[in-house]
Amino acid sequence: MEKRMTDLTNSALEDQGKGLTATPSELHPIFVPIFWSFALNYDNNPGVLSRVVSRVLTCQSTKKSTWDPGPPPDGGIKAWTAVLCAHLVITNTWGIINSFGVFQSYYTTALNRPPSDISWIGSIQIFLLFFIGTFTGRLTDAGCFRQVFAVGVLFQLAGVFCTSVAKTYWQVFLAQGICMGLGNGCLFCPCIATVATYLNRKRALELAIAACGSATGGLVFPSMMRQLLPRVGFSTAMQAVGAVQAGAWKEGDRDIIGLSYTESLNFVVGTINLFVPVAGICGICVLCWQAVETATGFYVWCCFYGMAAGGIQSLFPAGLSSLNTDVRKGGVRIGMVFTVVSFATLAGPPIAGAIITAAGGRYFGAQIFAGV
């Protein structure tokens, strides 16, 4: 038996020298106990054992590091279906976030709290969406996209329906701020990281179409809340929002000007080069908000600001994707940037709310703060 063990061990070492490496999980079943018997009984010769283990671990590390997922489909039904799905995901995440202005005014009256307190609900929701991007992105790179996505759906729906029955400030904060924020975070970053791997030449256009979901949701959910709140009450209105999020979205794609014009320029100018002036224009639009005095002027201002802000929202993920050269690490790299951004989204709304409260309800100071 000892002679047989020695012969098999020498044979394995010779194969490793030729570039043929075997590991305990890949050996013949008869050889597995012999391999471990060799490891346990040859304590007097640790040099041989260390060389064997080193070669096995080196081979396994090389196999993992050289794994190539292959080129992206770069078109076809599968790729564009993924884009459509990403559009619907962003509709259900950023759409409800963009509707927080409706919730802000309602909560201020119903909960009898100052705007600065209410703004913490929206800010913590956006903060968690971005903050957990590092963790959800890493899990996506590790092949756990479906598990992370399923957890996100459960948290999001639980947050919506718990908000519908919430009666106090802290109940709303936990349901809409914490629970929905965690759910949105488990959906958004993995979605962006995954859809960016389906196209190469038209990646910016692909991400812009996906980002159009924010505009779609920004039209649907605020309109629902404004129409349903005075008719059926807050609880039923939130349950209707949850039903829309849980159901299948069957509307076709539409071209949103605020999110599509940037992609036409992007092919000529470049994503990063275009992002800087669009961000500057957005800041100028916010500063121009001070000059609005009528409802008609406000609608006109909203059109210009929507085009500028929509351009930022579509260029942001496209720019991140263009900076990533390794598709295997796209999730964690995009998530790390989202985590950094999360701190700004956490601090911004409460600061603006405090400025408005200190100014006696006037928005002048908050407009300067946001524009600068």
Image: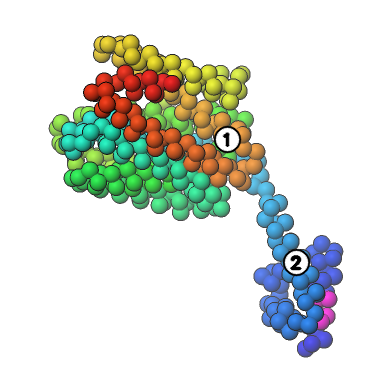
Q: Which of 371 and 57 is in front in this view?
A: 371
Query: Can see residue 34?
Result: no
Residue at 83% of width from left, 76% of height from top? 10
Residue at 25% of width from left, 46% of height from top? 170
Q: Which region is colored magenta?
A: 5-10
Residue 105 placement: quadrant = top left
The vertical placement of 128 against 32, above or below, is: above
Tell me where residue 128 appears, x and y as whole percent: 40, 43
Left or right for 245, reference 269: left
Residue beneath disc 2: 54
Where disc 2 sits, the SS reads helix
Is residue 254 part of the magenta span, yes or no?
Answer: no
The vertical placement of 55 against 101, above or below, is: below
Left or right for 303, reference 326: left
Name the colouring of the figure: rainbow
Q: Which of marks 1 and 2 is nearer the N terminus?
A: 2
Amino acid type assigned to the residue bearing label 1 in the image: Ser
Residue 59 placement: quadrant = bottom right
Whether label 1 touches label 2, CB < 8 Å: no
Tell me where residue 277 appears, x and y as whole percent: 53, 18
Pointer 1 local density, CA inside 10 Å: few below 14, some 14–19, many at least 20: many
Residue beneath disc 1: 321
